[in-house]
Amino acid sequence: MISIIYQKRAWPIYWCLLEKDGSSNLTEQQKVLRPVIRLLKEYKLIIIGDREFHSIELAQWVHKQNVGFVLRQKKDTTFRQKRQKFQPLSSIEIYPGVRSFYTNVNVTQKRGFGRFNLGVYWKRKYRGKQEKDAWYLLTNLPDLNTALKIYAQRFGIEAMFKDCKTGGYNLEDSQASPDRLVRLIFLIALAMTSACIQGQKIKLQRQQSYVCRSQEQGKTEKRHSNFWIGLYGFNWIVAWHECQAWVEEMVSSIRNKQAYYQRRLSAMKLIQQAL
């Protein structure tokens, strides 16, 4: 699946099913990347991939398409600087909070491949959590800070898959056949994009507090994404139509709550306009 990262979330735009278990190969990766590169040729693209997409063959092919890339490597991958012997990436001395950048390195002992840059970074402990592994990033970008900033956005893909599964649409529970699964993913992609756009509109109208508790005490990060706000904003409207008569009957008997009720009605009208 190929996705576009936008505001820490990935939006699926192209995908294909594989008739096998396990990782994809170069041919399959080219098959799913080629239409996207062609479609977005007017834009500056950077391909981000995790360790499934670590191959130097893929890096070479993407580079020939005049596209940037940041591909995470496995720590047993070998590399070589000029006039030195090949050694595994795991031999690089790296500690939490330390970063290094190597230019013009080989990452394969096969001939016929160009040299690229290699960034190495291990996140320091944050809020009591320590990353288990360092990042080994093969890239054709010119500096480490840019490569790290871009690769960090890859985790929006994890958030996207959670939205598709337990966080939203429960795709794994569908048990659909391959043909129906492709159609189902297409509908989810449309629905997900719509929910994200609607959530953004609700936030621009400053009405998100009626949908969710947007921020937890003591935390600086927002509690819910645009996707979550858009999805549950719609659910709020649907639920309202089911119980409107009961709510109005209850509110009419409690005068001091009527002003709050009218404010929520105004908020609901604004949210309906965003949907």
Image (cartoon, helix red, strand yellow):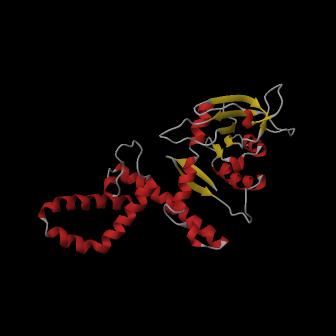
Q: Could you tell me which residue is drawn at 35 percent across and 65 percent down?
A: 236
**Horizontal and vertical percent position of residue 185:** 59, 65
- Above or below residue 87? Residue 227 is below
169 or 31, which lies in front? 169
Residue 180 in view (yes/no):
yes
92 or 104, which lies in front? 92
163 or 58, which lies in front? 163
**Horizontal and vertical percent position of residue 271:** 34, 59
**Horizontal and vertical percent position of residue 26:** 77, 52
**Horizontal and vertical percent position of residue 182:** 63, 67
Q: Quadrant of residue 79?
A: top right
Q: Could you tell me which residue is drawn at 51 percent across and 59 percent down?
A: 163
Q: Quadrant of the C terminus?
A: bottom left
State the residue lying farthest toward the right: 111
Residue 143 in view (yes/no):
no
User: Position of 101 compared to 267: left or right?
Assistant: right
Q: Quadrant of the N terminus?
A: bottom right
User: Position of 84 compared to 72: left or right?
Assistant: right
Q: Could you tell me which residue is drawn at 41 percent across and 50 percent down?
A: 223
